[in-house]
Amino acid sequence: MKKYINITGALLLIAFAMAACKKDTPIDEDGLLITSRQECFVSNFEMLGTDYVTVRTKAATIDTTAQTINVTVMFGTDLKNLYPQFTLAQDCKLDPKITGRTDFSDLANPRVYTVVSGNRQIRKPYKVLITVQPR
């Protein structure tokens, strides 16, 4: 009789453990939680050089209506090796991901980053427009 009680107890414990591991919350392909938030915007932007120090001459201008980010960098900045940093609305993500140095040297063709909302339904492309400070 004790043997059956132990086996039954072990099976119940396994069943509870499996139920606790069940994923009730949806996650995306990056392992990020998908929420109900629809906000989708850039709230702050930073541009760093290879030494991880800002190369901006003043705060970037973010236009959430036109979906542009205008940033002026110091004269002599190596535009092929920059690290952009975005601050996004809560639960948003950026596409493409920033994985390292980024080449911004083609000023005629600005880079475009898409902000994706927390519910993954809204996508807003932001152009990063760079101006080099004159001498």
Image: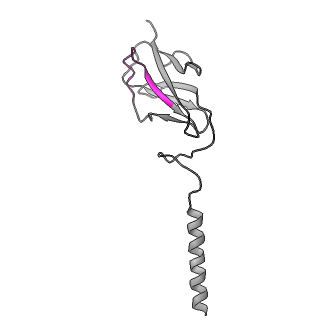
Q: Is residue 1 magenta?
A: no
| Quadrant in the rendering for residue 119 | top right
* Whole-percent x, y for residue 30 in the image: 48, 45
Query: Is residue 54 visible in the rendered structure shown here?
Result: no
Q: Is residue 42 above or below residue 10?
A: above
Residue found 48% across the figure and 24% down from its top = 47
Give left or right: position of 106 versus 55.
Answer: left
In the picture, the quarter occupied by the N terminus is bottom right
Secondary structure predominantly adopted by residues drawn in magenta: loop
Using the image, determine if residue 32 lies above or below residue 115. below
Q: Is 89 positioned to the left or the right of 129 in the image? A: right
**Figure disc tally:** 0
Give the residue at x 39% y 17%: 109
Q: Is residue 19 left or right of residue 55?
A: right
Residue under the point 39% across and 14% down: 108
Q: How is the image coloured?
A: one colour
- Residue 127 at what x, y percent from top left? 48, 21
Q: Position of residue 110 (x, y in %)?
A: 42, 19
Range of residues picked out in magenta? 101-114
- From the top left corner, tell me how far across and down residue 113 is, in percent: 47, 28
Please identify the quadrant where the C terminus is shown: top left
Of residues 21 and 83, the one nearer the viewer is 21
Q: Is residue 69 above or below residue 96?
A: above
- Can the viewer see residue 88? yes
Query: What residue occupies the far front of the structure in this picture?
Result: 121
Left or right position of 73 against 14 = left
Residue at 59% of width from left, 56% of height from top?
Answer: 24
Front residue of 5/48: it is: 5
Q: Residue furthest top?
A: 135
